[in-house]
Image (spheres, coloured by chain):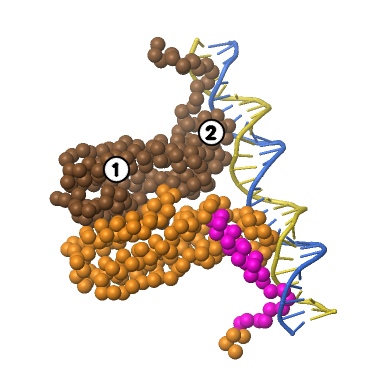
Chain colours: A brown, B orange, C blue, D yellow
Amino acid sequence: MAETFESTKPRGRPRSEQSREAILIAALKILVRDGYQKLTIEGVAREAGTGKSTIYRWWDGRSDLAIDAFFSAVDETLDLQDTGSAEADFRAQILGMANQLRGPTGRAFAAMLAGGRDSPAVASAVRKRWLDPRRDWARRRIAWAAKAGQLHEGVEPRAALALLYSPLYSPLLFGNDIPAQKDLAACVDLAAQAIFRR
Amino acid sequence: MAETFESTKPRGRPRSEQSREAILIAALKILVRDGYQKLTIEGVAREAGTGKSTIYRWWDGRSDLAIDAFFSAVDETLDLQDTGSAEADFRAQILGMANQLRGPTGRAFAAMLAGGRDSPAVASAVRKRWLDPRRDWARRRIAWAAKAGQLHEGVEPRAALALLYSPLYSPLLFGNDIPAQKDLAACVDLAAQAIFRR
DNA sequence: GCCATGCGAAACGCTACCGTCTCGCATGGC
DNA sequence: GCCATGCGAGACGGTAGCGTTTCGCATGGC
């Protein structure tokens, strides 16, 4: 009975799962290869081997499709730790994010960030579903670390977070990939030395 | 006599300096406001109050115009220091770059980086005229600092540079401005503590 | 087997911009 | 004053994608 609530039983041919997947995969492929601006409905239909009408039936348009395609490919789990050590938790979280974004996913992420300048819906989706939760966690954690006496004297939380996270993201700005695990670990180690008491 | 070399004296109406400036200003305005993808020749002509033919007479097309407009607005001087202290030199150079890019210029810079994905000419111009000279200097300087014993034990030069420069650039990725002087200085200070002997 | 609905294909009219071209006037060196 | 050249305006045919619509076939719950 809980099921039947606001679910009218559909009649006729059901939605094709195969087309749905082909469309999302094609959209993601174009997003990675050509960027958000070149993600066109006609292009996706061509690439996916479907009709435009099928896309317009299930998605509102370019931004809606891009958001769906991107988040169908990215692992959104926050994957947070809470050991007693803020340093260890930040290291785990940053390296974990890198793993989630590494490879084509990182290019798609960069494409979505760029697309956010054209589409408020894209900007807002990336913010709400990716950036905000991680930023909020980081702010809480650094504040907690400060209270717990785990930071060196005079370390500004804002600056500390910028230093920890910037090396992860900034390569995307220049069209490069997310840093390799060990390169990123070296950056985090270095930043951590300046930030955390041991 | 040196002057006349390969300069045939022009006859007829000379090029309008006023139109040239109006076109560059309009292109920059659009670049900042809408990004590289939306920088169209017709749009610039409209904004500048000129004819399309005037633009096509003097520029090859979109990428050529964007490059000219961007570099007409940005201060390209390297503004390098060479005191004995690598730390002081890096701080001065990073804060100097921030000053050169702060404000609308930073948005234009981000637009050019994004535009580089569509236009190899734009990518190459930004690399050759901005990124490469600065990256080369930084690599030489960090290597020199290592030799001079100004770095802490075991600091990897690559990681050190990533840590120093990333906080400057990374806000552009999220559509934010170049950091304020004091915020950036706090990041550099923090990074420097982990990197440089004092 | 009925038939509501989904499907791919493709045509529709529309908009934006491309890069070229032609026009008639403006400008300034000679 | 001559006249080569620059100028703004805008027409031109072309390309690309928009979002809608129509078509005839496919599918699967009932």
**Which residues lie in the magenta part?**
B5-31
- Report helix, strand or loop for mark 1: helix
Question: Label 1, label 2: how many angstroms apart (C-alpha)?
Answer: 35 Å
Question: Which tag is nearer the camera, tag 1 or tag 2?
Answer: 1
Which chain does the numbered disc 2 sit on? A
Residue B28 is a magenta residue = yes
Callout 2 crowding tier (Cα within 10 Å): few <14, some 14–19, many ≥20: few
The image shows residue B7, relative to residue B94, as above or below, that is: below
Residue A139 shows which numbered tag?
1
Determine the residue positioned at 48% across, 65% down. B74
Residue at x 29%, y 59% (from the top left corner): B188
Q: Is residue A162 above or below residue B23?
A: above
Say which quadrant the N terminus of chain B sits in. Answer: bottom right
Using the image as rendered, state which of residue C20 and residue C24 is in the foreground.
C24
* Residue lying at 25% horizontally and 61% vertically, measured from the top left: B192
Can I make out residue A76 in this image? yes
Q: Amino acid at mark 1?
A: Arg
Secondary structure beneath label 2: loop
Q: Residue furthest bottom?
A: B1
- The percent position of residue C15, horizontal first and vertical second, equals 66, 44
The residue under the point 43% across, 64% down is B100
Q: Amino acid at mark 2?
A: Asp
Position of C29 compared to A7: left or right? right
Which residue bears the numbered disc 2? A60
Few, some or many residues within 10 Å of mark 1 (<14, 14–19, 20+)? some
- Queried whether the magenta region covers residue B4, the answer comes back as no
